[in-house]
Image (cartoon, rainbow, N blue to C red):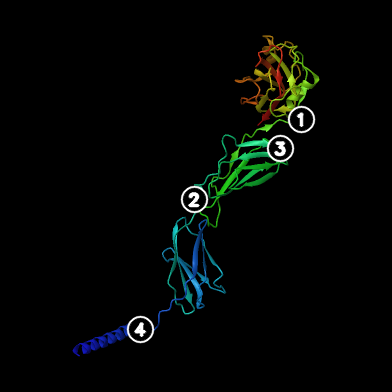
Amino acid sequence: MKLKIVSALLLLLAVCACDKDADKYRDYLDGQEIVYPGLPNSLTAAPGNYRIQLSWKPGPDPSVMKYRVFWNNGKDSVEVSRGAHTTSDTIEVLVPNLTEYTYSFTIYAYDDKGHRSVPLSAANIKVFGNSYRASLTNRFIVAAKPYELVPEGIRLFFEDADTINTGTRIRYTGNDDATHYSVLKAEENTIVLEDYKSGTPVYYRSSYIPVANAIDTFSVAKGEDSITNILAPLDKSLFSIVRLPNDANPYGGDTDLDNLWDGSVGPQGYPNIWHSNGDRPLPHHFTFDMGRVYPGLALFEITGRDGYHNPVQFEVWGTDNLTNAVTTLPGNNPGWKAEAIAKGWKLLKEVTRPDNGIAPYKVEFDEGLPAVRYIRIRVVKVASNDNAYSNLSELTFWRK
């Protein structure tokens, strides 16, 4: 009986104590209840160039009238009206004029009486700017083969792109002398620049995004890189045969020099070749006109026939004018070189091939060559060691 009375007394004291605490709590709140407006949903932050875009879905609480976004430890803020937004809408806020730094943002919802929700935060959001831009590099060209000339224009070859590359803008000159633009996509490694004007430089500049959801694209700070010294093939349609004294003659009418610029690719078979008739012992020479004066030859390619008598040791000579350029000595005369030089011919290149002379073989000309229009090939030795015949399939020249 005494135990029941003690328990009842303790319960009564506890109830009285609770009432007193509640009264004190209400006194502390000035007799008002705590009201927390509903939070927004799905907060995301997308960084950009000295700015950040925040977005969220409005909460279902109809009492919410506005939102306020705080950053910089609460020193800066921006207010956003709820408007007529529904829960299916997205509210977007652009925070500009930031520094290249890592920020945290806090959002509160407010009702019409000024009650504030609990905070919703987005932390460690990186803002990007000139420091990030300065770290970027243009996409790399394939060093071993940066380009090739194709019938449509020029094809460029690039290394694989960085995963955040958004594209590379290419600027070039067309055959109409106007500036043209094209874009290499990140997932592509090659691009053809149509109607490209041979010999002109190509410029390119890459762009990137720092993260997948970034709102701004950053181009490489240093600007464009370029592909220069692009070689232009000479127009073979301008080439023509020249017959000078002591030149080697063709074996037949269908094996003349014009087979050397018919556009054939790879070693050819008889009769689609140049085939001398054997009346001029080696060293012997032949001459042709390229159709115009070229100030700077850069490269040539020589292709042998599919069999024998291919030159493996020869000289390339040139002059810009045939007036008084006719030599009187045969090509195998010890005094021929001295006479050729005296007549205005310039030795452009001496070549010794390490193979059998069949495959296409490219040779670079040295810098500083004189302007030339007429070419003379003096064959010194052929792969078969024959002393009279020489055979070839094709000659191609490039200029800068």
- Comes first in the chain, label 4 or label 3: 4
Q: Which residue is mark 2?
A: 132
Q: Which is more foreground, mark 3 or mark 1?
A: 3
Which residue occupies the extreme front position in the image? 1
Q: Which residue is mark 3?
A: 151
Q: Are marks 3 and 1 in contact (CB under 8 Å)?
A: no
Provide the secondary structure element on which disc 3 rests. Answer: loop
Which residue occupies the extreme top position in the image? 334
Q: Which is more foreground, mark 1 or mark 2?
A: 1
Left/right placement of residue 104 relative to residue 307 reads left
Q: Which is more foreground, mark 3 or mark 2?
A: 3
Q: Residue at x 44, y 65 (%)?
A: 121
CA–CA distance in space, label 4 to label 2: 54 Å
Q: Which is more foreground, mark 4 or mark 2?
A: 4
Provide the secondary structure element on which disc 2 rests. Answer: helix
CA–CA distance in space, label 3 to label 2: 40 Å
Task: Residue 237: give its label.
Answer: 1
Q: Residue at x 51, y 67 (%)?
A: 56
Left/right placement of residue 127 relative to residue 249 reads left
- Asked which quadrant contains residue 160, the reply is top right
Q: Are marks 1 and 2 in contact (CB under 8 Å)?
A: no
- Comes first in the chain, label 4 or label 1: 4
- Comes first in the chain, label 1 or label 2: 2
Identified by mark 4, the residue type is Arg
- Depth check, front residue: 105 or 314: 314
Label 4, residues with CA under 10 Å away: few <14, some 14-19, many ≥20: few
